[in-house]
Image (cartoon, rainbow, N blue to C red):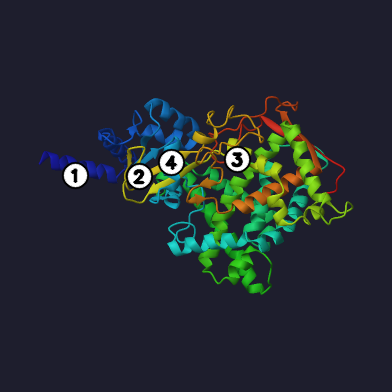
């Protein structure tokens, strides 16, 4: 009886303290239970070694200093494969050549499920960008492939160049800027142009608002919003509001197009003409805009930064583009954007080895990707270590791209370095095996066009925080999982327009 009275009194006290306090206590209790359960978990004979300490101490560094955290994990366990828990989720981290091959070729490892749980940095709308049926995912992939067919991509080139001209002219004749702001803004505009419709892409203010909303999704992505999405934290509320606002902008653009009856030669028209469900159209635009803008924006920002500190490679890129112009049907009196638009797609793709090398080296040294998968079953063994069904598996690209055995002096930007073709999956900048970036072709074309416009339209160099020439150049920050960005304000690009008319 005393025990019953005590429980009743505790229950009455709990109910009297208010909803906010009840919720906080419930979360604390939940985390305490998870910690106790993880403390009693033992490594099996064939299980990867667990990280030392409480699993709760893994949460913050995994999301905020991932590169350092994973390197510490390999050092602390002394193993090439280890595991840790993110609350109730088991995560296995793999490295090494054979593990890399298994990771990129295993049939049971699913990208969509892995990315959804461990990343959380895309706008999640059930049935639109998350929890999609296999048929809808296949439809989205098919439409993205259609965007990158020869015809549509050739027609897109003049639009990309015109957008580049318009944005670059707003920079003025000379000055300095942070590439992770200005160059990223440019690539965001180009992604909007490529993936959505003219109702959005032709409205600079609307594009700027969309970029701000997607930035709010990034800043609102915290360990709590990813692992405890049901918890109404201020960050989660901010993310939900940003997601709703993005959804409203996209659906309005679709409605405006349908009601106007005007036919436009753009991706939105292609999606509508294909007869896809509206949710597929909305999901295509909402999800792929940010996926493309982040990766392309990071690469473009770093590519131009590296060129600003390597005048030899900048000159090689300029000479290559000038040769393309000399062989084109354009007139020297035309603006640069119009002249570049006369160069066919097949020439951009097959006759630009310098630009190809610049893009490859930039994605090697300055794309801080950690590939994420979930084992949908059955149980899997990687390097004789068990990856149980339902567990998450991650592979840090730094394991191969910053490996001094494959890339001597790996932090050095050297587009002329010899490719280690003798090692499988020695370069995974665009993915590998059964899962590669579906927007690779579009991204490479955008990067080449932006680089061509910039190296012929501007002179530029890298400046330190005091505005003086910077040496050594800034180092990519792999702990910044989105942009690989060094500390803000630590450097800028100083530029001046050439005599070429954009």
Mark 3 touching mark 1, by CB under 8 A?
Answer: no
Where in the figure is residue 470, as x and y percent of width and height? Answer: 71, 26
Q: Is residue 1 left or right of residue 164?
A: left
Residue at position x 28%, y 39% from top? 33
Dot placed on the residue nearer the N-terminal end, 2 or 3: 3
- Kindly report the distance in space between the C-alpha atoms of the residues bearing marks 2 and 3: 28 Å
Judging by the rendered image, the residue that carries numbered circle 2 is 391
Query: Of tags 3 and 1, which is closer to the observer?
Result: 3
Few, some or many residues within 10 Å of mark 1 (<14, 14–19, 20+): few
- Of all residues, the one furthest to the right in this rendering is 333
Q: CA distance from mark 3 to mark 1?
A: 61 Å
Pointer 4 residue? 394
**Numbered label attached to residue 363:** 3
The image position of residue 83, as x and y in percent, is 36, 36
Q: Please provide percent x and percent y for residue 36.
A: 27, 35
Which tag, 3 or 1, sits closer to the chain's start?
Answer: 1
Mark in the foreground, 2 or 3: 3
**SS state under label 4:** strand
Looking at the image, residue 286 sits to the left or right of residue 321; the answer is left
**Which residue occupies 36% across, 36% down?**
84
Q: Which residue is mark 1?
A: 8
Nearer-N-terminus badge (4/3) = 3
Which quadrant is home to the N terminus? top left
Res 330 → quadrant: bottom right
Secondary structure beneath dot 1 equals: helix
Which type of secondary structure does the marked residue at label 2 adopt? loop
Asked if disc 2 and disc 4 are in contact, CB closer than 8 Å, the reply is no
Q: CA distance from mark 2 to mark 4?
A: 10 Å
Whether residues under marks 2 and 3 lie with C-beta atoms below 8 angstroms apart, the answer is no
Q: Is residue 422 visible?
A: yes
């Amino acid at each position: 009886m005393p025990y019953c009275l005590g429980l009743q009194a505790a229950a009455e006290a709990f109910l009297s303290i208010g909803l906010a306090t009840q919720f906080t206590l419930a979360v604390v209790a939940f985390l305490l239970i998870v910690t106790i359960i993880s403390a009693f978990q033992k490594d099996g004979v064939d299980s990867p070694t667990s990280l030392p300490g409480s699993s709760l101490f893994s949460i913050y560094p995994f999301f905020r200093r991932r590169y350092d955290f994973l390197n510490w994990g390999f050092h602390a366990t002394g193993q090439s494969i280890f595991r840790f828990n993110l609350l109730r989720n088991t995560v296995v981290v793999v490295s090494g050549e054979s593990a890399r091959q298994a990771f990129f070729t295993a049939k049971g490892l699913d990208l969509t499920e892995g990315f959804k749980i461990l990343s959380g940095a895309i706008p999640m709308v059930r049935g639109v960008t998350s929890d999609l049926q296999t048929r809808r995912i296949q439809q989205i992939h098919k439409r993205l492939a259609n965007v990158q067919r020869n015809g549509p991509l050739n027609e897109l080139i003049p639009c990309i160049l015109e957008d580049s001209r318009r944005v670059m002219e707003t920079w003025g004749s000379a000055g300095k800027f942070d590439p992770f702001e200005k160059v990223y803004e440019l690539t965001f505009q180009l992604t909007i142009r490529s993936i959505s419709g003219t109702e959005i892409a032709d409205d600079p203010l609307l594009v700027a608002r969309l970029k701000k909303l997607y930035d709010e999704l990034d800043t609102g992505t915290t360990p709590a919003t990813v692992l405890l999405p049901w918890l109404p934290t201020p960050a989660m509320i901010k993310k939900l509001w940003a997601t709703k606002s993005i959804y409203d902008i996209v659906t309005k653009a679709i409605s405006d197009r349908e009601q106007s009856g005007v036919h436009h030669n753009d991706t939105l028209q292609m999606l509508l003409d294909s007869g896809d469900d509206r949710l597929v159209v909305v999901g295509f635009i909402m999800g792929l805009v940010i996926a493309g803008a982040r990766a392309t924006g990071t690469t473009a920002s770093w590519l131009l930064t590296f060129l600003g500190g390597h005048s030899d490679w900048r000159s090689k890129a300029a000479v290559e583009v000038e040769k393309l112009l000399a062989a084109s049907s354009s007139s020297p009196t035309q603006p640069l954007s119009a002249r570049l638009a006369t160069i066919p797609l097949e020439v951009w793709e097959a006759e630009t080895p310098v630009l190809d090398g610049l893009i490859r080296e930039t994605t090697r040294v300055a794309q801080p990707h950690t590939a994420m998968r979930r084992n949908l079953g059955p149980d899997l063994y990687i390097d004789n270590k068990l990856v149980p069904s339902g567990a998450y598996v991650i592979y840090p690209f730094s394991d191969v791209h910053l490996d001094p055995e494959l890339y001597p002096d790996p932090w050095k930007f050297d587009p002329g370095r010899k490719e280690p073709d003798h090692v499988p999956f020695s370069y995974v900048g665009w993915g590998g095996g059964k899962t590669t970036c579906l927007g690779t072709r579009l991204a490479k074309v955008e990067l080449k066009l932006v680089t061509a416009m910039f190296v012929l339209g501007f002179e530029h160099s890298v400046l330190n925080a005091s505005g003086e020439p910077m040496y050594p150049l800034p180092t990519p920050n792999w702990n910044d999982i989105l942009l690989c960005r060094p500390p803000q304000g630590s450097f800028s690009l100083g530029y001046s327009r050439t005599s070429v008319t954009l």
